[in-house]
Image: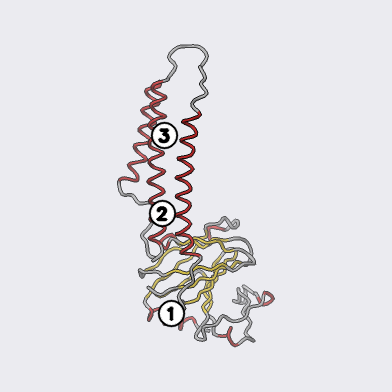
Amino acid sequence: MGATVAILIWAVTAATLWMFLSGRWPMPELISLHGQGWDSQYLMTIIIVGIAFTLAQIGLGWCVFKFTDKKPGPATYTEGSAKVETTWTLITAAVFVMLGITGQRVWAHFHLTDPPRDALMIEVTGQQFAWNVRYPGPDGVFGRTDVKLVDDAAGNPLGLDDKDPAARDDVVTQNQVAVPVNRPIRLILKSKDVTHNFFVPHARMKQDAVPGLATFMHFTLTKPGKYEVACAELCGQLHWQMKAFINVMSDEEFQNWLKERAP
């Protein structure tokens, strides 16, 4: 029985390793400048954890095979070795601290650095159950909003105040994000109701949209195409409807896209 269980453990371990070593990369195609850092961090984590996982499973299988009790009677108990446990714990702690430090550098580069001055500003506001996307229009300034003016039925989900000249040229779309390729984007994330999460797997972007807060991030997308945007936070019964697309296009196509939707 012990040999059968050991072989089963080793077989599952080998199958798991094959999934990674065969080149079946679990992440979609990368389309952002910053994403290379995330992928490198992810790959390093997978390699380290994979080595630890493999050694642990080999050891587990060997113990099951070697120490299977073939005789009836009570099992024996050993307290183990404090020296070995201390050494293993320190090694594990050092590895996790190292991964935390390198991961912090990648995170800080994405979230704590200033965007270029010519970055295009886009505001995305989540609500149950849609993404509202706003562009500042030709004046480059977001207009004033007022919560008292919010009226989804009237087509004003953000409460734009048309008494403010800066608000009159703002372009608002729903579940459609368009960006020019190879141009820095400064994204402002907000929420009208509950916590949502703006997730673009191809761009390696994932950030909460929190009610009462404005969170910022900046990025540059490098490959034209249409990519899925999802909400990665369970935000309500119809959470599955929080599906949108981000269209990466040439600058000329983007300007035409804006003009077509201008008020």
Categorize mark 3 by other alpha carbons within 10 Å: few (<14), some (14-19), many (20+). few
| 129 left or right, relative to 70 | right
Colour pattern of the rendering: secondary structure
| 126 left or right, relative to 28 | right
| Amino acid type, label 3 | Ala
Residue 241 or residue 214, whichever sits in front? 214
| Amino acid type, label 1 | Trp
Q: Point out residue 134 in the picture as x, y percentages from the top left corner.
A: 53, 75
Categorize mark 2 by other alpha carbons within 10 Å: few (<14), some (14-19), many (20+). some
| Amino acid type, label 2 | Gln
| 68 left or right, relative to 197 | left
Contact between marks 2 and 3 (CB within 8 A): the answer is: no
> Can you tell which quarter of the image residue 52 is in?
top left
Label annotation for residue 257: 1
Quarter containing the N terminus: top left
Q: Mark 2 falls on what kind of element?
A: helix
Residue 101 or residue 261, whichever sits in front? 101
Residue closest to the far left: 22
Q: Point out residue 97 in the picture as x, y percentages from the top left corner.
A: 48, 48
The earlier-in-sequence mark between 3 and 1 is 3
Residue that badge 2 annotates: 41
Alpha carbon of mark 1 to alpha carbon of mark 2: how far?
36 Å
Q: Mark 1 falls on what kind of element?
A: helix
Label annotation for residue 116: none
The residue at 61%/76% (across/down) is: 156
* Position of 41 relative to 109 (above/below): above
> Can you tell which quarter of the image residue 63 is in?
top left
The residue at 39%/45% (across/down) is: 48
